[in-house]
Image: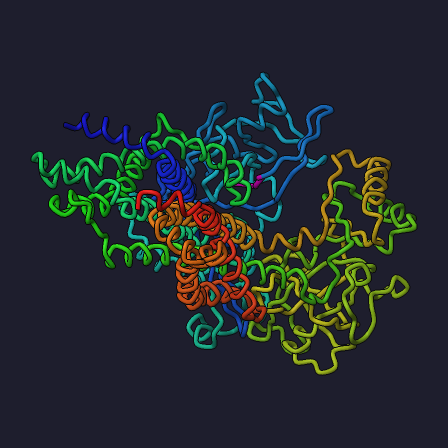
Amino acid sequence: MFFNFIKIGLRNLVKQRFYSVINILGLATGITCFLLIMFFIIDEVSYDSHFENKDRIYRMISNVQFGDNSFVGPLSPAPFADVLMREYPEVESALRLSYSGDFFVKREDQNLKEKHVIYADSTFFDIFSYEIIKGEAKTALNRPNTIAICESVAKRHFGDEDPIGQTLIMDNTRKCEVTAVFKDPKKNAHVFYNILISMSSREEAQNGVWLSNNFPTYVLLKEGTDPEAFLEKTQQISEKYVYPQAKQFMGVEETVDEAGKKGSMMTFDMQPITDIHLGRNFEFDYTSTGNTTYIYLFGAVACFILIIACINFMNLATARSATRAKEVGIRKVLGSFKKQLIGQFLTESMLITAFAMVLSLGLLELSLPFFNEISGKSLSIDYLTNINTILVLIGVWIIVGLLAGSYPAFYISKFDPAVVLKGSLYSGKRGAFLRKGLVVFQFTISIFLLIGTAIIYKQLQFVQNTELGFHKDQILLINDAWSLDDKTKTFKKEIEKEPYVKSASVTGYLPVQSWRSNTAFWGEGPLLDDNAILMQSWNVDYDYLNTMGIKLIKGRNFDRDHATDTAAVIINETAAKRLGYKNPIGKTVRTYIDMPTPENPMHGLAKMEVIGVVKDFHYQSLKEQIGPLAMRIDDANGYIAIKYQTGHTQDLIKASEKVWQKVGAGNPFSYTFMDDQFMEFYNREIRVGKIFLGFSIVAIVIGCLGLFALSAFTAQQKTKEMGIRKVMGASTKDIIILLTKEFSKLVAIAFVIAVPCSFFIKNWWMSDFKYQIDIGVEIYIYAGLITFVIAWLTTSFQSLKAAMVNPARSLKYE
């Protein structure tokens, strides 16, 4: 019986080739999109799940409150990990990391830039189960100037040689011995590093200062430990270590309880490692974070697209039910039961879905590189050996086959043989109403996605074109300026000789994605914690404001002729307000420009004169309010920013590379543009926009495939009616309008439903931005027009074809 179902199903697929191809294409496209998003979601929710002790690993979160300032983030004081290990028996191991960005790694004449480099304590491999290939995990990072490298880094620098015991030069300055090689880490982890440098190599890690949070800290709790009880015990650390230093450094006299009542405190929290990627997005969190809202949204989009594809199948199957009616009637007369008929039609549905699945696997392989590019992923799919992938594919095949085929199977199997064998079957208003409802649903989703895409791109366009308070265009950024050592000024002087160069500045702090430093400042009042103001503190040079186009509204700029300007500061409007200075010029601010020590608490405390105030500018994304900021003269050789005249981009790049080689940097030359760097703030939003756009197009294409086939069937059913109308004097235009009008009404209804639904996207997505564009009605009108025109073109082809049929041909048997 089952094989007979398959045989008949294959025969019907071949017999109705046009509709079979439409169904297979629609389902294959929908399944491909669904699988892409499902594998994306699986990757997102499985971050860090491959670590052996994932259920016992936590990242420590510091909650710092002093005065009106607060900091909540995954950075902790340098001595914190050691105290946890030494004083808390619940802790099996503790670890500090210190982010360092990219490094130039040199061996002999080869100098390569390596990404994902970090300083780590020797306990790294105790907590994170990186697989060691060579060397010993326990001793790999227990000495200064030792490094552990991943397999691919070892291959790049040593080829087939044994790296253990050999030397790599980090950033042209530090010679490090390779003590371990580990397998390339999995990328779906927030802890993803290619090179680990021993923490004992970092001088800052050795200080005993509790009032500076710079180190991400992790703990591995012993089995059976209650995390909540352990966390409660850690609150004693503030009383034992933090407040004595606060008293020593800033004259704080309160007890812990008194400070807490006043609002000044330092407490700790813990974050399970598996919650980090999709958890709270902290300031100064340098790990890659996801977004649970996007997960739910993309999951819904994936389901909707799959449902749209299934609706195509249902619509065509029920619309074409009349062509199978006599077959059903004869089968029932010959003794077929209803369940056998249902089995026949479900088998056909499963066959079509199977062909669609095979096609979708090919489409998946073709589209995966493009999807990886727009989503920022590195997904690869193992179809043969990964049991989870196989189960997902089988599950999708069964669900889609049953979902798409169930309604047509039950609908057609209910036909009365006495009626259908007389040739008087009429699908009735109920069937037609359902088909129309499904078409409306399809286009509601399509228009909803189209409006959502338009809103996203409109806000991104606003971000690119809004007044930021600085110039981001026509500024070339030379990366890795620190590698020039003391020759940065030489480079700057040489490049400024080019006639098209307006100015240049050397700094690591830019009003785009770059370095950041939160520092406590005090005005002219007592040096107490509740008088402190947490501000961005940037080291710049004398040409910074001019190069960036930042407007000075009070006082003066830094001047090389003023020797005292090295002890001066320029602040923004927000900082002046927070300091309470109505006229800040000449006023004094104080801050630590170097790390104090327990032996000398006043070490690094600097007193600076405010010489200027700049207009507030957006140094963060438009998701954030402008905060207080201070700039002072000091070295920060991260970038060389070069402002140049329009039309000389290639000239400047060539000249910069020539000067770079001339001054003997010894490292590869690389550059970027400030406007591109600015858009790094919105990488996630850009990716969401691209994904929305892609799936909006797919939804419309799938919907139009179904509409095309449905209009073809409708035109076929109304061939005689069209012939009679033409005989009665109807023109080709009248026939086309008649046939397209019905489907146009459905699109119009879908538009009316989609517009209020799209307010959800507007309110949800725009809520992330502190500065938003006003969404006008034109977005909704354009989305409706685009969908209407596409739908009209889709149906008009079949309508024109039907209208051109000679009435003598369509009525020759009447």
Marker count (numbered): 0
Residue 565 in the image: x percent, y percent? 82, 65
Q: In this view, does 183 lie above or below 242?
A: above
- Which corner quadrant of the image does residue 546 belong to? bottom right
Q: In which quarter of the image is the N terminus?
A: top left
The answer to whether residue 90 shows anywhere in this view is: no
Name the residue: 77% across, 60% down: 548
Q: Is residue 415 left or right of residue 731?
A: left
Picture quadrant where residue 758 is located: bottom left
The x and y percentages for residue 395 are 28, 38
Q: Is residue 577 left or right of residue 78?
A: right
Question: Which span is picked out in magenta?
Answer: 116-120
Q: Which residue is drawn at 28% across and 56% down?
A: 434
- Along the viewing direction, whichever of 630 and 422 lies nearer the viewer: 422
Q: From the viewer's perspective, tell me whether residue 766 is left or right of residue 555.
A: left
| Res. 129 visible in picture | yes
